[in-house]
Image (cartoon, helix red, strand yellow):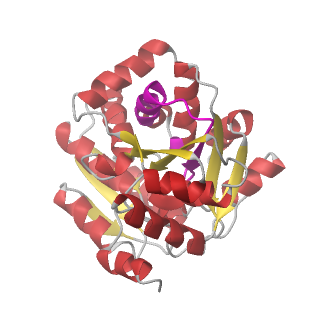
Amino acid sequence: MFDRDSLTDAQRIVRAAFAPTPQQPWPLLSQRLGADVWVKHENHTPVGAFKVRGGLTYFDALRRREPGCNGVVSATRGNHGQSMGYAARRHGLHATIVVPRGNSVEKNAAMRALGVELVEHGDDFQASREHAAALAQRHGLHMVPSYHDDLVRGVATYWIEFFEAVQPDVVFVPIGQGSGVCACVAARAHTGVRTRIVGVVSAHATAYQQSFREGRPIEAPVTTVLADGMACRVPDAQALDVIRREVDDVIAVSDDEVAAAMRALFADTHNVAEGAGAASLAGALQQRTRWAGRTVGVTISGGNVDSAVFSQVLAGA
């Protein structure tokens, strides 16, 4: 997907902003899964999620491609928007972010704290994305997509960090719009590891799983309450092409399984994970019989869960 120089350049850009995040084994998680489990802690980035890496590389390339750009717009459920806000501020650009009505209160607050102009529109991510595209046309703003090679290139840096430290038999990767899993594919090729990649979608947002199985983009309804970072109704065709070529399987986890994984991460590691951030472990738990006794990689891809939601999850509500 990328040559070595482009990924090395992405590493340089990301490391100028923050240090590599840790990856480490957790004995209680390994005991729970009956496997040697390593966790990549993307909840420890400056915005609490992996997306910031892609924002940094995207804006670096944007500044070179469009030096006259003075504003951007994008749509998000939260972590992509924080990434845009963080990177836009570093490059002196104004960012407008569109979120669905009823979006995470604390993610909205985090975006505003980064200087983002927040617009609430639509009932789901797809409606917000369409409104963002309309704002871009109306006001002459640069529309930042949810999936783009420059985003993937930045996100790949976290998987490169992981694969240079650990060579697991399998990794479980959450799928939202596809940048995370495609970045894992790129990092696997870059490092030469032979790790199998299993994508994880929400059982209440199965567009990518259905599309993976059918070999063509399929739109599917979104009803997940907990895993908003995986609330994809329409898959990206470019991402789907990579997933179908390179990913070994795509499985689905329910909100109940995600909640159980959030509780397990807190109990076993005392780390907070949002719904999508715990989906990797939820997938590993679902598949633990198959991978018993092996080395398993999971990621806490984000920790940005509202306090009220997390308290309900911990209480088993």
* Closer to us: 100 or 163: 163
> Is 9 situated above or below 133?
above
Magenta segment boundaries in residue numbering: 155-180
Q: Is residue 289 part of the magenta span, yes or no?
A: no
Residue drawn where x is 51% and y is 15% of the image? 3
Rendered location of residue 65, percent (x, y): 35, 25
User: What is the total number of numbered labels drawn onto the structure image?
Assistant: 0
Left or right of 179? Residue 46 is: left
* Closer to us: 5 or 289: 289
Left or right of 67? Residue 147 is: right
Name which quarter of the figure residue 252 lies in.
Answer: bottom right
Residue drawn where x is 39% and y is 55% of the image? 302
Quadrant containing the N terminus in the rendered view: top right
Of all residues shown, which one is farthest toward the right? 214
Q: Is residue 172 part of the magenta span, yes or no?
A: yes
- Specify whether residue 92 is in view: no
- Specify whether residue 136 is in view: yes
Left or right of 153? Residue 297 is: right
* Closer to us: 171 or 18: 171
Rendered location of residue 271, percent (x, y): 34, 59
> Is 148 situated above or below 140?
above
> Is 315 situated above or below 45?
below
Residue drawn where x is 18% and y is 55% of the image? 115
Name which quarter of the figure residue 76 lies in.
Answer: bottom left
Rendered location of residue 33, percent (x, y): 58, 55
* Closer to us: 45 or 128: 45
Rendered location of residue 300, percent (x, y): 43, 52
Of all residues shown, which one is farthest toward the bottom? 317
Name which quarter of the figure residue 312 lies in.
Answer: bottom left
Residue drawn where x is 33% and y is 73% of the image? 306
